[in-house]
Amino acid sequence: MRLSFGQHMQMAQKQVLAPRMIQSMEILQLPIMALAERIEQEMEDNPTLEQSTGDGEEYDDEVGFDKPEDPNAPEDGEREMVVDEAHNNEEDFERLVNMAENLPDDYEERSRPSRGQMEAEADRAHDAMMNMADRPESLADYLHHQLNWFDAPEAVRKMAERLIYSLDTNGYLKTPLEELVPPTPSAEGIDPVKWRTEQLEVIHAALALVQLFDPPGVGARSLQECLLLQLTAGMPFYDELKTLIQDHLSDLENNRLPIIVKKTGYSIETIQEAWEELRKLKPKPGADFGDSPVPQVTPDVFVEKNEAGEYEIRLEDTQLPSLAISPYYRKLLQQAGSADQKTREYIKQKINSAQWLIEAIEQRRGTLTRVSEAIVAHQTRFLEDGPESIEPLKMQQIADKVGVHVTTVSRAVDDKWIQTPRGIFPLKRFFVGGTTGADGEDIAWDRVRLKLQEIVDGEDKSAPLSDDALVEALAKEGITVARRTVTKYRKAMNIPSSRQRRDWSKTPAAAE
């Protein structure tokens, strides 16, 4: 191994992402609402970036600069502005100065929003604030409010308050009661054993108080305790339910009804009727308070059929403002005495940044359109016949078709939604793996899952199909899969095992 402190030349290949490319990738990945927020923030931070009102002068949609009055005239202003970091964009900024000479003297005043526009914007902001959803009441808030309804010793109330804030989102107390005992005071004359015993009595009293609160079952330390807390003496099958919950929850879970019949003497019909009542209880009493509001989905892409029966893609970007570079700052650059060199450099930097943003948004629009068109073209059967007809599709296939890198496709579809005649779907929904059928046709895994559910729904519940039998049933439908694949999908679809799916009421002989 050679060690030296000399200077050496070395050739190496390195991938360096320019700031402009990084910004372009960030813009591409943003969904429509996040992009609108990003544009709003950029407009606040960059004084040279403004929203075009469409009044008076027209501007170039792609780069935001004024078009010459005669489109056929070969003026210097027709050339597109291109960000050139190597030459500091000196020629482009000279064009900005020249274009500013034709601006009217009162342009600065005209470009400012009118009082009516400002009031309208204020009204929209006020309406948005008034329509914001209130923060939903938490489980702890709900229980703490009920605590005020009960008279209890101060020590019990304080411990009940502590227990309320120790519950998990499902309403269970997972902390052992012994861990809630406060430390023994260091004062003389206090018996640690007696202190601990008294504190445990306070904790048990506080827990009993909390378990009286609504929703029923809150404050339980186990599923069994939670269900027992929800039983009331007047409900149907009260005695049977109490026995089943205390002694046979595991047997119920695994559908071992003959064992319950043997140990309790209950009939199959009684057990099944009690089981139906048991299903009405809530195993997670606090779950309703943990539900967060479902966020509103705003599709980025719309697909519709035209008169010729072909699917067309349309981007939903009308809510995005049309951006342009402020002619006021171009004029400011032209007035040599109005700003020092530092200010001029600052303006140039901001105009450069604004141009990058405008071009990144246009590039996002083009990439998302082409990617969406390729996806729709591949998944036409899905749109025509429904989810059961979805085709296997990988991102690399779309990347090859569009002519971009696969990571570009991934960013383009990330967190984007598409409105179709069959509903709203995330764009990622259309990318699925698959297998090969008996006839050599590619079959998406979604179709396999749908067929698996169809077979299970149509089976004889007195003799449900095992996983091996499900493999054979799928093979008869032309779908060849391994047993472990069937087991994996069955569990993912929350389909119970064949033992758990068995209906014992149809096989009385087996229950004897």
Image: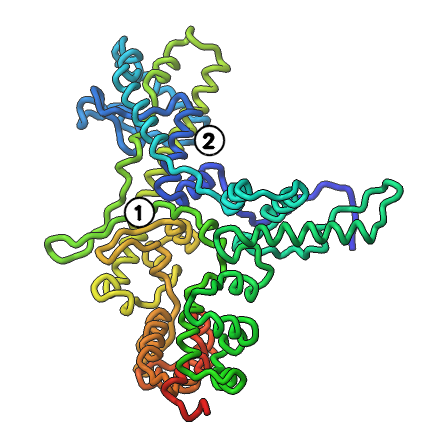
Image quadrant where residue 211 sits: bottom right
Q: Where in the figure is residue 480, as x and y percent of width and height?
A: 38, 82
Q: Is residue 47 above or below residue 358?
A: above
Instruction: Read off the residue under disc 2.
Output: 85
Instruction: Read off the residue under disc 1.
Output: 299
Residue drawn at point x = 27 percent, y = 15 percent: 114
Q: Where in the figure is residue 489, as x and y percent of width and height?
A: 43, 73
Q: Is residue 350 above or below residue 260?
A: above
- In space, the residues marked 1 and 2 are separated at their CA atoms by 36 Å
Asked whether residue 29 is in view, the answer is: yes
Classify mark 1: residues with Cα within 10 Å, few (<14), some (14-19) or many (20+): many
Q: Is residue 498 above or below residue 210?
A: below
Is 333 left, or right, of 313 in this rendering?
right
Q: Amino acid at mark 2?
A: Glu
Q: What is the quadrant of the N terminus in the image?
A: bottom right
Asked whether residue 493 is in view, the answer is: no
* Dot label at residue 1: none
State the residue in front, 357 or 184: 184
State the residue in front, 239 or 179: 239
Image quadrant where residue 281 sits: bottom left
Classify mark 2: residues with Cα within 10 Å, few (<14), some (14-19) or many (20+): few
Image quadrant where residue 186 sits: top right
Q: Where in the figure is residue 358, as x and y percent of width and height?
A: 35, 33
